[in-house]
Amino acid sequence: AQSVAQPEDQVNVAEGNPLTVKCTYSVSGNPYLFWYVQYPNRGLQFLLKYITGDNLVKGSYGFEAEFNKSQTSFHLKKPSALVSDSALYFCAVRNTGGFKTIFGAGTRLFVKA
Amino acid sequence: GAGVSQSPSNKVTEKGKDVELRCDPISGHTALYWYRQRLGQGLEFLIYFQGNSAPDKSGLPSDRFSAERTGESVSTLTIQRTQQEDSAVYLCASSFLVSNQPQHFGDGTRLSIL
């Protein structure tokens, strides 16, 4: 069975500092991994995905994520946080060849000025 | 429009009434998903449609919930005999029928059961 864990309900970081939002996953076979962001009263917006190849993937708004197969992790990172990055972040996993997507519980990011 | 459109954006109804939520996917997206998001929580998978194949209904929480899709177009999620625990935001998403493609979400329908 597929599962996703986001161990932190909330992450607090000062503006200009690097940020990391953690995600670990469990899936039989090879995964497709996604990060989404949700702003208040809006749907989720796609940030980036890992399909295959380079373990470091770059996405929208300066975000990147590192795929680590041995640790089954896909942590979201950004070198320098902005106040406008404050939002709810979701990690998601899907089996290659499948469509059912499992989302983590979400991590709320607060960036303080 | 360019994105996924959901209507109504807000729905308030009395316990026991039936409600119908609508989703218009992005044109050309043959995969369509419904999720439920309770206040402050993550996404709970309900159902997805993949082209002409049978839908995966494994996430529907009870037989009061049903969904239909007309071809590769509009989908409706129906909740019969609503209960207070049905109060949530219902999100619809669509994507191309390629499993490495991300989903595009609508802004959801906020359902409140009095």
Image: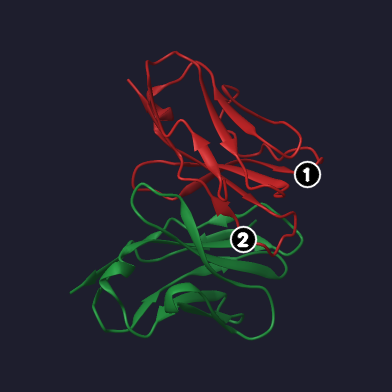
Q: Residue at x 57, y 36 (%)?
A: B23
Q: Secondary structure at mark 1?
A: loop
Q: Specify the quadrant of the image occupied by residue A77.
A: bottom left
Q: Which chain is red?
A: B
Q: Residue at x 53, y 18 (%)?
A: B80
Q: Which mark is residue B75?
A: none
Front residue of A49/A27: it is A49
Q: Which chain is green?
A: A
Between discs 1 and 2, the one toward the N terminus: 1
B54 sits left or right of B59 in the view: right
Relative to A96, residue A74 above or below:
below
Q: Residue at x 61, y 61 (%)?
A: B102
Question: Which residue is label 1 attached to?
Answer: B51
Question: Which residue is label 2 attached to?
Answer: B102
The chain identifier of the residue carrying mark 1 reads: B
Q: Quadrant of the C terminus of chain A?
A: bottom left
B50 sits left or right of A24 in the view: right
How many labels, in total? 2
Looking at the rendered structure, the kind of residue marked 2 is Pro
Relative to B8, residue A10 above or below:
below
What is the spatial separation of the Cα atoms under label 1 and label 2, in whole angstroms? Answer: 16 Å
A53 sits left or right of B39 in the view: right
Q: Residue A98: x percent and y percent?
A: 73, 57
Looking at the rendered structure, the kind of residue marked 1 is Gly
Q: Quadrant of the N terminus of chain A?
A: bottom right
Q: Residue at x 53, y 75 (%)?
A: A73
